[in-house]
Image (cartoon, grey):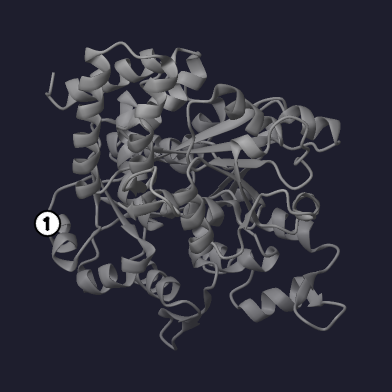
């Protein structure tokens, strides 16, 4: 069979072929696959096969978090040559922009959860989508529904719970959606009760019961303190057995050596005005570096403004002026991406790397439960006990000797710089060796939030290839300026 590869030459992994096969084979299916497993590319491959075979003749609707709906699905198509003929149209923006998108011809339409109810009302009885993909299906777990049967044998659905989930269920029930795919790496972040609503979309209660209360009575009991419910001893095995024929569940440890770090790049797009400002700054730097040989340290220092702009906030004024440095915000795309990661990891503790104080302040403001790593007594102990959901640290502050592996195994690089040693040491604090030494059998995940088409890409390329700062800068800037037609 012809091997699929992306633009970087990385092959489609065996489990991605399995995901694509399962989606083609099973019309209503839940894909519970670990973070960073490439579910999007696998699902797109399945959609492509269904369309080529004529099995799916109507457009596909993907419902996802805002940034994912806007950037990720269309971006993934550009990464894989075998998918580049697919047309993706994000239904994003103002009402007029969304309406304009609906008039475009596309194979796949993507929309964020917040606009889903609007979309359903806009189409009314003319619902055009034959297949629905819900990316991060825990967003619809709140559904509480029941199917009623009239005296003449016809059925209708009665929904309760979240408005989006109710609206989606009504349209899929009434229009008899041919295919429904659910994607997430964390299907039950708060326990097995999260599963009922998600599976009701797939089988209308056939496997876990037509009524949520019946589901609870069958498999749960009141917790010992009288607050909430906990599963009966036999519940996990019985629930898994009931849904196994429409579920594919993949664990990272089954496919990756525990010594491997699973790297996931989260590419963000700069908004138009931020992109314009960035390009002006980069052109000035490129001219300066090209015209005058500079030492590696200076070359890196001269790109700090670009790195700041890529992250979303740039220092202003004279750096030598007394008092705290002031900075201006240009965008919040990286903060939005970090929010998506928090949701995807479903409560797992995150170690977040930042490069600039402006990044730190913005992260702490967006995420009130986040804690800045400092030498303050007790912070490291609290992290290692799992008491800090997000520990925000500069790579220079968590160097040699610190052991942070007890607190978690997920590193998020919000922003980085050119220091290769600190870059490596940051990962080492929770890395595979330390995990193994402490007896943890779990993979380490590294999320990299990267502003597409910026010096961000050069920084990570420099760390990967060990190429000099100046060489990485020159190559990266030439590549981007050439793409813009400026060279």
Residue 51 spot, x, y in % from top left? 29, 39
| Residue 318 image-quadrant placement | top left
| Residue 92 image-quadrant placement | bottom left
Residue 472 in sight from this viewpoint: yes
**Viewed as shown, does residue 170 lie left or right of 421?**
left
The residue furthest bottom is: 151
- For residue 281, above or below residue 407: above
Q: How many labels does the image show?
A: 1
Could you tell me which quadrant the N terminus lies in? top left
**Viewed as shown, does residue 474 lie left or right of 342?**
left
Residue 343 spot, x, y in % from top left? 54, 57
- For residue 39, above or below residue 137: above
| Residue 144 image-quadrant placement | bottom right
Could you tell me which quadrant the C terminus lies in? top left
Residue 71 spot, x, y in % from top left? 32, 45
Q: Nearer the viewer, residue 104 or 397?
A: 397
Residue drawn at x 12%, y 58% is: 100
Residue 6 in sight from this viewpoint: no
Residue drawn at x 31%, y 43% is: 269
SS of the residue at dot 1? loop
Q: Nearer the viewer, residue 283 or 450?
A: 283
Q: Which residue is labeled 1 in the image?
A: 103
């Amino acid at each position: 069979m012809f091997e699929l590869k992306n633009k970087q030459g990385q092959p489609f992994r065996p489990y991605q072929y399995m995901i694509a096969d399962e989606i083609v084979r099973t019309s209503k299916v839940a894909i519970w696959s670990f973070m960073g497993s490439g579910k999007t590319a696998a699902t797109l491959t399945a959609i492509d096969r269904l369309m080529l075979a004529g099995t799916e003749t109507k457009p596909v609707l993907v419902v996802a978090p805002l940034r994912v709906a806007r950037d990720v699905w269309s971006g993934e198509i550009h990464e894989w040559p075998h998918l580049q003929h697919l047309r993706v149209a994000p239904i994003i923006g103002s009402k007029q922009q969304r309406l304009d998108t609906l008039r475009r011809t596309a194979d796949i339409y993507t929309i964020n959860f917040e606009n889903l109810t609007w979309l359903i009302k806009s189409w009314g009885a003319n619902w055009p989508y034959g297949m629905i993909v819900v990316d991060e299906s825990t967003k619809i777990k709140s559904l509480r529904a029941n199917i009623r049967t009239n005296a003449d044998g016809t059925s209708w659905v009665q929904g309760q719970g979240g408005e989006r989930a109710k609206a989606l269920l009504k349209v899929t029930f009434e229009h008899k959606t041919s295919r429904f795919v659910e994607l997430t790496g964390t299907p039950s972040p708060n326990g097995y009760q999260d599963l009922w609503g998600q599976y009701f979309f797939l089988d209308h209660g056939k496997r876990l019961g037509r009524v949520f209360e019946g589901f609870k009575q069958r498999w749960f009991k009141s917790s010992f303190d009288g607050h909430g419910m906990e599963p009966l001893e036999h519940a996990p095995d019985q629930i898994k057995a009931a849904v196994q024929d429409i579920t594919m569940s993949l664990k990272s440890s089954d496919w990756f050596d525990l010594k491997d770090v699973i790297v996931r790049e989260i590419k963000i797009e700069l908004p138009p005005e931020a992109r314009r400002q960035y390009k002006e700054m980069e052109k000035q730097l490129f001219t300066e570096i090209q015209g005058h040989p500079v030492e590696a340290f200076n070359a890196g220092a001269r790109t700090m403004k670009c790195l700041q702009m890529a992250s979303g906030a740039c220092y202003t004024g004279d750096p030598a002026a007394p008092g705290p440095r002031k900075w201006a915000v240009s965008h919040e795309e990286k903060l939005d991406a970090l929010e998506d990661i928090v949701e995807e990891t479903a409560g797992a503790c995150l170690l977040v790397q930042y490069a600039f104080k402006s990044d730190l302040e913005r992260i702490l403001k967006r995420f009130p439960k986040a804690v800045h790593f400092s030498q303050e007594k007790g912070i490291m102990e609290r992290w290692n006990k799992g008491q800090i959901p997000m520990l925000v640290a500069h790579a220079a502050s968590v160097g040699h000797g610190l052991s942070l592996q007890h607190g978690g195994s997920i590193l998020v690089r919000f922003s980085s710089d050119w220091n290769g040693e600190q870059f490596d040491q940051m990962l080492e604090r929770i890395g595979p060796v330390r995990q193994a030494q402490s007896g943890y059998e779990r993979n380490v995940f590294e999320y990299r939030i990267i502003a597409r088409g910026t010096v961000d890409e050069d920084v990570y390329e420099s760390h990967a290839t060990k190429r000099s700062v100046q060489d990485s800068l020159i190559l990266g800037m030439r590549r981007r300026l050439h793409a813009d037609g400026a060279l």
